[in-house]
Every structure is written in C-alpha cells, then in structure tokens.
Image (cartoon, rainbow, N blue to C red):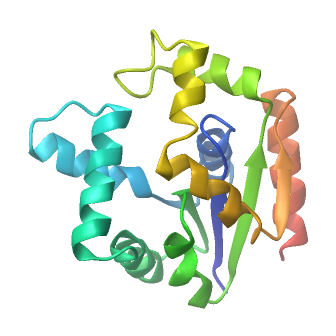
Amino acid sequence: MKKIIAFVGEIASGKGCAADHLIQKHNAGYFRFSNMLRDIANRLYLESSRNNLIRISELIRENFGEDTMAKVIAKEVEEEKSELIIVDGVRRQADIVHLKQLEGFTLIEITADKQMRYERVKNRGEKTDEQNLTMEQFEKNAQRSTEMSIREVAKEATHTITNDGTIEDLHNKLDELLTSLT
C-alpha cells in the first residue's frame, strides 16, 4: 500500500528539507503545490517571487474553485508509482479534501521557532524577493491569506514534528515517524 505524506507548516519550518530527506533516503515521489504556480509564472515570463506565486494561486482559486489545485495534486499522487509519496506546501483546507480520500494519506505538521524560520528564509533565497527580507516583512508575509490558513489545516495533522534542532535531528524524527506509519 502507498504511503502518502503531506506536510503543512509555516514558511521555512522545514517542509522542503523533510521532503528532500524522504526523497533521497526512501526514493519517495514528490509533489509540491507551488511547482504548478512556478510553471505558470515561468510560462508567462513572470518572476517567481512569493507575491507573484500568491497572486497566481489566488486567481486560480477565485476563478476555478478553491480546490482546483488540490484536484490536480490528488490526481498526480494517485497516478504516481512510488510506494512513498510526499506532498509539500499544503496551506488550505481545500488542499487536503481530495488527498484525504486516498488510502494511506497522513498529514504531518512541521513547526519551528519564528526567528529560526526567518533566518532560514534569508539564507535559502528560494524566492527572488527573499534575500533582503526584513523581520518586519517576514512577519507581514505571515499574515497573508496563504499563510493564515496553515494554522487551521495544521489542526488536522495526526503528527507534529518540531524542527528546532539540527538537520540530523529532523532526519531522525522523520525516519522514526515513517517506521511508525507502517
């Protein structure tokens, strides 16, 4: 039976690092909500900034339905051949509606201290507008609609991993959790 693990957590809590570990160590399949947004931004020759990705997401959800992106992810997950599948970037209740219907689905919350998450954002530079981010801007971003809904979705998680330690600590916690899901 497939194991489908979806990660929910605030900006830079460690969802991507957790996914990377499970992909590398356990050959997991991988799906990320923001990848489809980046595909659209790239196709339109738009910068892949947090602001642009949020705007694209909002346009899709407002015009085609709150669960449109979730339907795409659920369909791709269902067709994936890997035994372990990771879904990264769950942010809204609608994101898990279709995934919850798939056998083997587990929602995991990843948490981390705000200061630590801020430093991670600045150091990773994943989005084009993150390198010069101030703490004030970081806190303002946390108030956007795409971030506010994370707290509600996280209430549905069956497991929580606190990611305030080393990368090795995170890996150990993930491996232990994965073993418990068998």
Where residue 169 appears, as percent x and y from the top left, is 88, 35
Where residue 31 appears, as percent x and y from the top left, is 46, 60
In the image, 1: left or right of 142?
right
* Residue lying at 66% horizontally and 67% vertically, measured from the top left: 5
Q: How many marks?
A: 0
Residue 92 lies, with reference to residue 52, above or below; the image says below
Instruction: Name the one closer to the observer, 148 or 80.
Output: 148
In the image, 53: left or right of 163?
left
Where residue 179 appears, as percent x and y from the top left, is 87, 66
Where residue 43 appears, as percent x and y from the top left, is 11, 46
* Residue lying at 42% horizontally and 57% vertically, measured from the top left: 33
In the image, 113: left or right of 24?
right
Residue 138 lies, with reference to residue 2, above or below; the image says above
Instruction: Name the one closer to the observer, 139 or 121.
Output: 139
* Residue lying at 28% horizontally and 34% vertically, measured from the top left: 48
Residue 143 lies, with reference to residue 90, above or below; the image says above
